Every structure is written in structure tokens, then in C-alpha cells.
Image (spheres, rainbow, N blue to C red):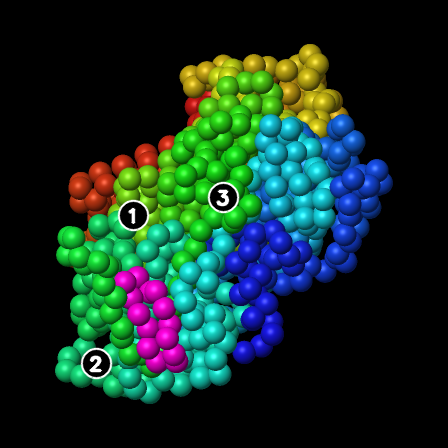
């Protein structure tokens, strides 16, 4: 066992005592500990120069100097923890354009950020742990936030201050607490020692050091008992302990060491402290079916207590009423352990904590129930849902909207979180069951709603989401604040009010509700180009055409107004239109002669793109009678698979033509229509307005 692992395990158990603890509040799987890159400077709180020191610490991280409050560096919003939640929230706040350099601060002593949802893939030999990490400072560079490369050791909510490990106190107007949860390795006797042993029989996907030992251990096992454990209580990504099992079992199956019937060279057991395999009954039923078909033993209510030696482990099991708790000891040849987990001591012992030690926030608004200027999301929060990165994609926009709303003195409870979370369960190499649900274990499936498929059925497409898409979108978009999970990239606020700043030629205005006004500002930054976003804070640019005397207003049925404002550089609809075609405005269909745009009309729609034109001309392609009857036959056999688009592709004609000669059955059309309606509900303001606008322009022309 390396020193590094030893120190990791030791450090990650304590709260705030050591400078090098990494407490990444990540979604799936557990934080790890590495030394921060910055030099540790011990500062004395009583030293009158400590503020000066704090400033130099801040600038050490290439950050602006903070203003002070009562002698303490002070910020409008201080974020505790730079993991998935902290980074996502920081970037989303920055993108609102409401904050200047130094208004925001992030406190985290970690040198690295790990994409922990990917560690299951490392344990299965599909990725390396190194490719899943990034230096933390690099991820924060594009915000104007001050980074303190220190962890918090004390919360002082009544004074609006937090204390850093070197004694510095940082003051805040608003505090966002998302330091994640800790692995409590020490709660299982003998586990740390067993993980350090050379035999490599005890492994875990739940730490940076040990995750790379998992796949070699799976590869080298040829026979015996393999036990995969899940502790009773909260864990990050509650599906991860069994993902390790499903993939290992599949590996051994492919290696000829497992069979569905009779005896296999390797026996596989899932020992969980919980009574069921998964908390949501729909997915639990599907998983149990797969488990039985693959001959995997379920040891329910078996909570790992102790690892005795390199081949024996004890579990507590329920006893009959009135009898003392029992324990059973099992032999193993490979043990994949998931450590018990819980809130960091610094949070659990603070006034912020609920009885279980998590930051006590309102389940809908993410606002603290007792300190209105404190907020929390992610693993450290008391939000009663599964702790995953997917959950953070839904929590962060709610927190940001409500925090900004509260700062503006408005109603902070505008946006609400419904408990959305997701667990992409790898059930074998190449297949994933995409569990998605909200509070109360109610199903909330993205693709089920869009395409009418059952997400409890493991699929290859979901596997690629998990293995390739999510890691890329995580670093490329999520922690940069531009990914809203199942809602995709267009960051639409929880009320669907996402506003574009201005458009050059035409602008939509409406009378947004108070909620929309607030959120329009919240999400404004998301519509800017990435180059602009980097140069934030963005100001709403003054519209140079605001006083254009030629502006025409077209009220739309939806309540919005479509305003046409020809730029001064172009001839206005009222001006004499020259024959010179270079003088054509893009808003004029044709500037020549009598075809000039009538001044009372908004711009014409641009001509159809080449591909659309090609598709239209393909409509005239004549199909043979055989082809037409084949189309009808395919449509009748499997109308779900053979959509209009699929058939059009196959037969080289347009989907419209297909829909005319072989319309889909009424029920299928009905279901599609419902999905389409559901999809429209999720449209952001931009999309809605652009569709409305096109419709209006089509009608007017
Ligand atoms: C998601 O957004 C996300 O973040 C990048 C994940 O990575 C950990 C996920 O596992 C899931 C399920 C989502 C949710 C997104 C969709 C499209 C279902």
C-alpha cells in the first residue's frame, strides 16, 4: 500500500484539520485527497496583518483583491466547495452578468477536480482515473471569482462569516454551501488496512487511489466468492455499488467463469445494508429480474461491519425482535467495498446542519430553513433525493434563480426543484439502464417522454451517453454553467424564461411576469456567445435602434410584440428602393421594383435552405408501386421504428410524401403528438419566441 493511499484515507476522514483534504462535493462516488498546489501559510487570526495575508492568498490564485467588511475580506456571494455543485453554481451566477470581478468567491483547498461519476468506468477498465481529472484552478479561470485555496473549518452564520483553515475569516452577503460528503472508511473496522494490503482482494471504486486497483483485481480472479457491498444509509450515487458488480460479473461471464445455470467458477453476491436492490420500485423490479437471470445472490440487509483478514468479512443482519443484533461472517476472494458516507464534520457540527448533519434547506427552493442568506445544493445539502451529478444539473439553476431573486429583494421562492435525479446503471459492458426520477421516487424519464421507450430496459444508446457523452458535456458545459441536464444546453430557467439580450433587426418584447423578469435576468448570460461569456460581466448593450422612427410594432396573439426596426445603414421600407441589389436588406425579400417589402410587414422568412429545397424536389421523385407497397408494409409492421424520416431516408423521398402515402396509425400519431406537446412545454423563451415569430411572419406574408 502506498503512502499516498494511507494519507488519503486518513485525511478524508477528518474535518478540516489538515490542509490537504480534498472535499469535492461531487455527485457520484467519493472525494479524494491530494495536496493543494499552493503553499500552506499558517496565519494567525489575531495578527492585525491577517487581512493583508488573506489578500495575498486571494491574489495567489490570480484573483482580484476583495473589499473588506469589518476588517474581513468580503464578497457578495461566497461558495464553499469547488466540486460539481460549487463550480456549476459559480459559473451560472457569473453568467447572469450581475456580478463584477471579486463579487463572487470560492473556497476550496483542492488541487484537482475529479469527474467521479466516471470512476465506475475506471473500475471496469474503460477509462483511466487520470483522464477524468482536471486541475481545479484551471476550471475556475474564466470567472471573475476570488478563489481561496483553503477549506472552511467553521461557519459563523450569525456574523455572516466563515473561518478558513488558516484562521482567515471571509465575510459574505450570501453563502452557498456545497462541500460534498465524506467517505467514513473508519466506520468499517479493518477496511483501510485491507485496502492497503498487497493481496489486492479488497478494493473500492470510491477513492482516487484505490479505484485503479479494481479492474486488475477483477481480471486476476479466476474462482471463488466475489462480494460487492453497499452500506446502509446515504452514499453518493447509490447505484454505483451495484454498477461495479454488474460490470465485473459481465467480465467474468465473457471470460467463461460464470454461467446462468449450475455452478460457476466465481460466485457473485450483492450484500447491501438496504432491504431492496434500488429505491425506486420500477427499476428495482427490472434489476432483480436481471439479477436472477444472471444467477447473482442478493444479501439484503447485510451491512458491512468489519473486514477481518484478507478473506473474511462480517455483516450485521437484522435479528428477531427482542434478540441482540446478529452478525454473519462470510468468506471472500474479492471484496468490493463501498464505504459508509456522511456529511463533513465541519458542516454536521455547525448551526447550519439538520439532525442528520446535512445543510438544512427547503426541499423546493434550496434556501436554508433558518438562515435566509444561506443556500445549499449537491451532496452536502439536505435535499431528500439521490446524490448525483444529474441532480445538480437540476438544482443549480433553481438555487441561482432564487438567490438572485432574493438579492434583488424579490420573492425568493420563484423557482422550485422537483427532486430530479438520475442514475445511469451500467448493467453490462455496452448497456445502461437510465433510471430518472424525482421526489417520492416518481419516474421522470427524459427519453421515455420523448420517444415513448421504457428506460428500465438497458440500452446501448444510454451506454454511450454514460461513457462518452456525459463526461464530455460535464467538463465542456456543466461545470461551466451552460448545461441544464435533461433540458440540454439552452439554459432555460425553471420557469422557462430565458431571454436573449437584443437582436439586431427585430426584437420581441412582452410583458413578462415578475418571475420572468427576474429569471430573464438570471438566464440572460446564457444566450451570449462563449467569447462574450468569457468577458463577463456582460452589460445589456444599449439598443442603437431603440429610437428608430421607422420601427413597426406587431402585437402577437401570445401577448408578445414583434418589433421591426430596420438598421439605419439600410434603406428603410419607406425610402425609395434602388435597383442596386447590393442595397438589399436581409429583411426585404427582394428590393427590386414592385417586389419591395411593404412597410407594414415584418421581415420575410429567409429562403429555404438548400437541404430543405432538395428534400422538396425529392417529393416529386416517383416511386414504383412496389416501393410504395413496401413502404406501407414497413409502416404497418413497425410504425415506431419506421418513422416518416426513417422511411424517407431509406427510399430517398421526403417525409411529407411518406406521410401522405403511408400515414402512421392514429394511436402512434396521437402518442407522438403528446410527446411533441410535452417537449414544447420545456422550450425556453428563445425557442418559443422564435417559433412564434416565424409563425407570425408566415401568416403576414
Ligand atoms: C446529466 O446531465 C449528467 O451530467 C453531465 C450526467 O452525468 C453524470 C448524468 O448521468 C445524467 C443522467 C444527466 C441528465 C441528462 C440527460 C440527458 C438524461
| Residue at the extreme top | 549
The CA span between labels 3 and 1 is 39 Å
| Whether residue 393 can be seen here | no
User: Residue 267, percent across and down?
Assistant: 25, 79
**Which residue has dot 2 on it?**
259
Q: How many marks?
A: 3
Between 673 and 416, the one lying in front of the other is: 416
Quadrant of image for the N terminus: bottom right
User: Residue 638, percent across and down?
Assistant: 20, 56
Q: Secondary structure at mark 2?
A: loop
Q: Quadrant of residue 189?
A: bottom left
Labelled disc at residue 348: 3
If you read the primary sequence from the N terminus, does the residue marked by circle 2 or circle 3 appear first?
2
Between 311 and 74, the one lying in front of the other is: 311
**Which residue has dot 1 on it?**
448
| Residue in view at x 55 percent, y 31 percent | 374
Q: Secondary structure at mark 3?
A: helix
Nearer to us of marks 1 and 2 is: 2
Q: Quadrant of residue 552?
A: top right
Residue stretch rendered in magenta on the structure: 302-316
The CA span between labels 2 and 3 is 46 Å
If you read the primary sequence from the N terminus, does the residue marked by circle 1 or circle 2 appear first?
2
User: Residue 253, percent across and down?
Assistant: 28, 80
The CA span between labels 1 and 2 is 32 Å
- Establish whether ligand 1 lies closer than 8 Å to the Cβ of label 2: no
If you read the primary sequence from the N terminus, does the residue marked by circle 3 or circle 1 appear first?
3
Q: Residues within 10 Å of mark 3 (few under 14, many from 20)?
A: some
Amino acid at each position: 500500500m502506498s503512502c499516498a493511499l494511507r494519507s488519503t484515507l486518513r485525511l478524508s476522514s477528518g474535518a478540516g484539520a489538515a490542509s490537504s483534504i480534498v472535499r469535492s462535493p461531487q455527485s457520484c462516488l467519493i472525494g479524494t485527497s491530494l495536496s493543494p498546489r499552493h503553499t500552506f501559510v499558517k496565519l494567525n487570526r489575531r495578527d492585525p496583518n491577517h487581512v493583508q495575508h488573506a489578500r495575498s492568498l486571494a491574489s495567489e490564485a490570480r484573483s482580484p483583491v476583495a473589499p473588506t467588511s469589518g476588517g474581513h475580506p468580503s464578497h457578495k456571494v461566497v461558495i464553499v466547495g469547488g466540486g460539481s455543485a460549487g463550480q456549476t453554481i459559480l459559473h451560472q451566477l457569473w453568467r447572469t452578468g450581475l456580478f463584477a470581478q471579486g463579487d463572487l468567491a470560492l473556497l476550496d483547498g483542492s488541487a484537482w477536480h475529479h469527474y467521479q461519476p466516471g470512476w465506475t468506468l475506471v473500475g471496469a477498465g474503460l477509462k483511466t482515473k487520470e483522464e477524468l481529472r482536471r486541475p481545479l484552478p484551471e476550471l475556475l479561470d474564466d470567472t471573475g471569482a476570488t478563489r481561496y485555496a483553503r477549506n472552511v473549518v467553521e461557519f459563523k452564520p450569525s456574523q455572516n462569516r466563515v473561518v478558513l483553515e488558516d484562521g482567515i475569516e471571509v465575510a459574505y452577503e450570501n453563502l452557498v454551501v456545497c462541500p460534498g460528503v465524506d467517505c467514513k472508511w473508519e466506520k468499517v473496522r479493518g477496511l483501510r488496512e485491507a485496502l492497503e494490503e498487497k493481496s489486492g482482494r479488497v478494493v473500492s471504486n470510491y477513492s482516487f487511489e484505490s479505484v485503479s486497483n479494481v479492474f486488475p483485481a477483477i481480471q486476476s480472479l479466476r474462482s471463488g466468492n466475489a462480494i460487492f457491498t453497499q452500506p446502509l444509509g446515504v452514499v453518493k450515487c447509490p447505484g454505483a455499488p451495484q454498477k461495479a458488480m454488474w460490470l465485473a460479473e459481465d467480465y467474468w461471464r465473457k471470460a467463461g467463469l460464470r454461467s446462468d445455470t449450475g455452478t460457476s467458477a466465481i460466485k457473485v453476491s450483492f450484500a447491501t445494508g438496504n432491504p431492496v436492490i434500488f429505491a425506486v420500485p420500477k427499476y428495482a423490479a427490472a434489476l432483480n429480474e436481471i439479477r436472477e437471470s444472471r444467477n447473482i445472490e442478493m444479501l439484503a440487509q447485510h451491512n458491512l461491519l468489519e473486514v477481518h483478514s484478507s478473506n473474511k468479512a462480517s455483516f450485521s443482519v437484522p435479528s428477531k425482535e427482542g434478540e441482540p443484533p446478529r452478525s454473519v461472517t462470510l468468506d471472500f476472494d474479492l471484496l468490493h467495498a463501498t464505504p459508509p458516507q456522511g456529511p463533513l464534520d465541519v458542516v454536521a457540527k455547525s448551526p447550519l446542519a439538520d439532525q442528520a448533519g446535512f445543510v438544512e434547506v427547503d426541499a423546493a427552493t434550496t434556501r436554508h430553513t433558518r438562515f435566509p442568506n444561506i443556500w445549499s445544493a449537491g451532496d452536502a445539502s439536505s435535499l431528500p433525493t439521490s446524490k448525483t451529478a444529474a441532480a445538480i444539473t437540476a438544482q443549480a439553476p433553481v438555487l441561482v434563480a432564487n438567490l438572485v431573486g432574493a438579492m434583488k429583494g424579490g420573492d425568493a421562492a420563484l423557482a422550485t426543484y422537483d427532486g430530479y435525479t438520475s442514475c445511469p446503471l451500467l448493467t453490462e459492458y455496452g448497456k445502461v439502464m437510465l433510471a430518472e426520477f424525482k421526489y417520492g421516487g416518481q419516474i421522470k424519464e427524459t427519453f421515455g417522454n420523448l420517444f415513448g421507450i421504457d428506460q428500465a430496459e438497458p440500452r446501448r444508446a444510454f451506454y454511450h451517453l454514460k461513457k462518452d457523452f456525459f463526461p464530455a458535456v460535464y467538463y465542456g458545459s456543466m461545470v461551466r454553467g451552460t448545461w441544464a441536464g435533461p433540458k440540454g444546453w439552452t439554459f432555460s430557467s425553471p420557469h422557462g424564461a430565458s431571454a436573449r439580450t437584443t437582436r439586431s433587426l427585430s426584437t420581441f418584447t412582452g410583458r413578462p411576469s415578475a418571475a420572468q423578469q427576474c429569471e430573464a435576468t438570471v438566464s440572460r448570460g446564457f444566450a451570449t456567445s462563449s467569447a462574450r461569456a468569457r468577458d463577463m460581466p456582460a452589460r445589456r448593450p444599449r439598443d442603437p435602434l431603440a429610437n428608430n422612427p421607422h420601427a413597426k410594432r406587431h402585437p402577437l396573439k401570445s401577448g408578445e410584440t414583434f418589433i421591426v426596426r430596420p438598421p439605419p445603414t439600410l434603406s428603410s421600407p419607406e425610402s425609395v428602393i434602388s435597383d442596386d441589389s447590393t442595397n438589399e436588406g436581409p429583411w426585404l425579400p427582394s428590393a427590386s421594383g414592385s417586389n419591395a417589402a411593404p412597410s407594414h410587414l415584418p421581415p420575410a422568412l429567409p429562403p429555404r435552405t438548400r437541404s430543405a429545397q432538395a428534400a422538396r424536389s425529392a417529393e416529386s421523385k416517383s416511386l414504383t408501386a412496389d416501393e410504395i407497397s413496401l413502404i406501407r408494409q414497413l409502416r404497418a409492421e413497425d410504425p415506431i421504428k419506421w418513422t416518416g424520416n426513417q422511411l424517407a431516408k431509406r427510399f430517398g423521398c421526403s417525409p411529407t410524401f411518406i406521410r401522405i402515402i403511408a400515414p402512421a396509425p392514429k394511436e402512434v400519431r396521437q402518442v407522438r403528438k403528446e410527446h411533441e406537446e410535452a417537449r414544447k412545454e420545456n422550450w425556453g423563451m428563445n425557442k418559443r419566441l422564435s417559433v412564434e415569430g416565424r409563425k407570425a411572419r408566415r401568416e403576414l406574408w
